[in-house]
Amino acid sequence: MLKLLHPEPKPTRGERVATAVDRRVPLSEAARTLLRKAFPDHWSFLLGEIALYSFVVLVLTGTFLTFFFHPGMEERPYTGSYEPLRGVMASEAYSSVLHISFDVRGGLLIRQMHHWAALVFVAAIGVHMLRIFFTGAFRRPREVNWTIGVTLFMLSLLEGFCGYSLPDDLLSGTGLRTAEGIVLSIPIVGTYLAFFVFGGQYPDHEIVPRMYAAHILLVPGLLIALIAVHLGLVVYLKHTQWAKPGRTNQNVIGEPLYPQYTAKSTGLFFILFGLLAVLSAVMQINPIWDFGPYRADQASIDSQPDWYIGYLEGALRLMPRWETDVLGHTVVWDVFIPGALLPAVLFAVLYAYPFFERWVTGGGKEYHLCDRPRNQPTRTGLGVAGVTAYAVLLLAGGQDVLAKVFEVPFELLTWVLRTGLFVLPVLAFCVTKRLCLALQARDRARLQRGEPAEDVRLAADGSYERVHTALPPEKSIPIVVRDMPVPLHRVGRWYMPVGRYLRRALSRWYYAERVEMPLTDEARRQVAAITADPEQAQKAEQDSGS
């Protein structure tokens, strides 16, 4: 009777459509799964989000700039509002950038936000990759996601260079001239490749429109597609996490995506957007009106590219003069090696490293707990050595400015940087490895003695000593829970193939040096259970249950 008096309301048309769609495409179930995803609460995991939100700012500001930028290369006298350049022959691209900067309301602010966001975007990707490298988050099952991240880093460098070259000013034109020289240095195919890319002899009217199409369409499309795949794999594979009470290699503990992490992440976006806006309002960047339009017979002094290409400039400056003639072809080694071969080797090493370390380690275990960098001294030393080499090349990219500012002879500075490029990375590796082992020894001492308390006590010999208390689980678990592979040992036969011998030697070099922690047999079993492979742990649990 009550149902007749109070009939249930009929679903609206929108509800019926949503129900019909959900029956065919289970969106609500996927949304519930996504909203329940656990995100780690450590600050280092925000680096990837800074890169993502910088890219969002780039898309927003770049969309605004496309309405006013014209990539034409036809030259005519400049007639805009910037008086010092009136009457100067300038390309349509250069004149349109001046128009954005001085005539479009808010144009200079948006243009500078675009440039600063590009710098932050590349920097955030680089630091994010360093965090992944030093914590071992590239290992199985995340090797594919690491390769996608390296590809994103490479595409971001290409995207930044294309955008940097669009204004056709003297500074960006000098960079394009350098890029053409690098392409020409490639043996045999360099000349054909340069004519194909630049549309003829540089400077030509084809390169800027082509780079504009790549900058606003081709590369951003690839970036968006790869970012989507990257984030999808992050959701599917789950985040790595730091060792803490309750966290193991088989679970993921963190804040749910909604509402906690969504609020935090949204706040991070607006903070980043505000900081970029303030930075762009108070700090000038790339004032192309000071450089003037590009002229093939001119070069700007004290010119350096953006920091992410600075290592390439430094490598070109440090390379000594070297050319050879082979079968009638001149090979310009002093341009080819630093300009083309060095970046190729760099990215080849980045792509191959996860698989190389897996080969050295031996075994296909999954890793979901982050390594403390001190617990992997060889890997940490290699990373610091790479960063040191990059820093030396970056300094070399501005060697003329450094020589002028510090009043150091240019030739002396060049030889110091050349020597430092080979000596400092090796020194940084050795020092970093020793520091990691020293920090492991300090952790061992903390476990043995405990944390110093505020109280002191009188010893039997009449001296005073600090009272120590045992470390709480929040501090002891990150120290004892570590997954350090055992070096591969020689198997049975007296003779081994060269590859197996090399693998064994590298494994000992990687994992032989360590400081063992003072653990009981029961504690070691607990650590082994925490760091066990998820498949093996699940199988052991099923066997024990049966």
Image (cartoon, grey):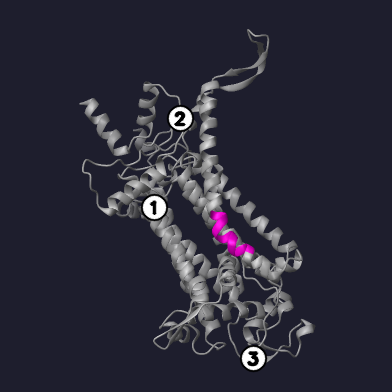
Q: Nearer the viewer, residue 427 or 51?
A: 427
Which of the two labelled residues, at mark 1 and mark 3, occupies the earlier sequence position? 3
Q: Nearer the viewer, residue 178 or 381?
A: 381
SS under mark 1: helix
Which class describes the residues within 10 Å of circle 3: few (<14), some (14-19), or many (20+)?
A: some
Which of the two labelled residues, at mark 2 and mark 3, occupies the earlier sequence position? 3
Q: Amino acid at mark 2?
A: Val
Q: Which residue is mark 3?
A: 75
* Image coords of residue 397 (percent x, y): 62, 68
Cα distance, mark 1 to mark 3?
50 Å
* Image coords of residue 360 (percent x, y): 35, 48
Left or right of residue 297, residue 510 in this image = left
* Image coords of residue 440 (percent x, y): 51, 34
Quarter holding the N terminus is top left
The quarter of the picture where residue 111 lies is bottom right
Range shown magenta: 416-425
Quarter holding the C terminus is top left
* Image coords of residue 301 (percent x, y): 70, 77
Cα distance, mark 2 to mark 3?
68 Å
Q: Nearer the viewer, mark 1 or mark 3?
A: 1
Q: Is residue 28 above or below residue 86?
A: above
Q: Which residue is mark 1?
A: 354
Q: Amino acid at mark 3?
A: Glu
Can you name the residue that lies furthest to the right here?
Answer: 83
Let me know if residue 479 appears in the view: yes
Q: Which residue is mark 2?
A: 480
- Number of the label disc, if any, that sits on residue 87: none
SS under mark 2: helix
Cα distance, mark 2 to mark 1?
25 Å
Q: Amino acid at mark 1?
A: Pro
Which class describes the residues within 10 Å of circle 2: few (<14), some (14-19), or many (20+)?
A: some
Identity of the residue drawn at 59% across and 59% down: 420
